[in-house]
Amino acid sequence: MSPEKDRIQKIEFADQMCPLCMGSGLVSELGLHLRRVRERLGLSRDVVAEYGMISAETIRNVEIGKARPRLSTLVCLRKALRKLGAEEEEIDKIR
């Protein structure tokens, strides 16, 4: 097992196999939900990052379960998705 995959598996919030990476890593439900919402809206990470005033790399790391977002990051993501047309039900799941 690669050191990176081993490290990801040890993250306590990484609780679901990633259907996007064909089992090469684990992601949180938050990461999967964020990616699904973003893709449903047809948005790139760069667009969400610009609206949320955070980096696209941060969004990527949250989506793949490599990072657990701070509360301030979650607030920025929620505001950005709201501005970009996400439904309130979707936004409520980002916490």
Image (cartoon, grey):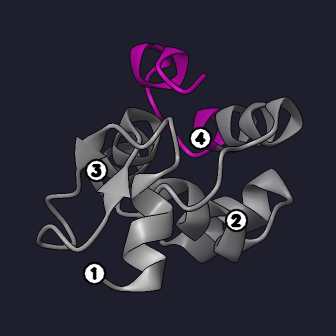
Q: CA distance from mark 4 to mark 1?
A: 36 Å
Within 10 Å of disc 4 (Cα), the crowding (few <14, some 14-19, many 20+) is many
Q: Where on the picture, by quarter, is residue 62?
A: bottom right
Q: CA distance from mark 2 to mark 3?
A: 19 Å
* Contact between labelled residues 2 and 4, with CB atoms less than 8 Å apart: no
Within 10 Å of disc 3 (Cα), the crowding (few <14, some 14-19, many 20+) is few
- Front label number (2 vs 3): 2
Q: CA distance from mark 4 to mark 3?
A: 11 Å
- Front label number (1 vs 2): 1
Q: CA distance from mark 1 to mark 2?
A: 25 Å
**Left-right relation of 34 to 53:** left
Instruction: Residue under label 1, please give it.
Output: 1
Could you tell me which residue is drawn at 38 percent across and 53 percent down? 35
Instruction: Residue under label 2, please give it.
Output: 58
Instruction: Residue under label 4, please give it.
Output: 81
Could you tell me which residue is drawn at 59 percent across and 41 percent down? 81
* Contact between labelled residues 3 and 4, with CB atoms less than 8 Å apart: no
Name the amino acid type tagged 4. Leu
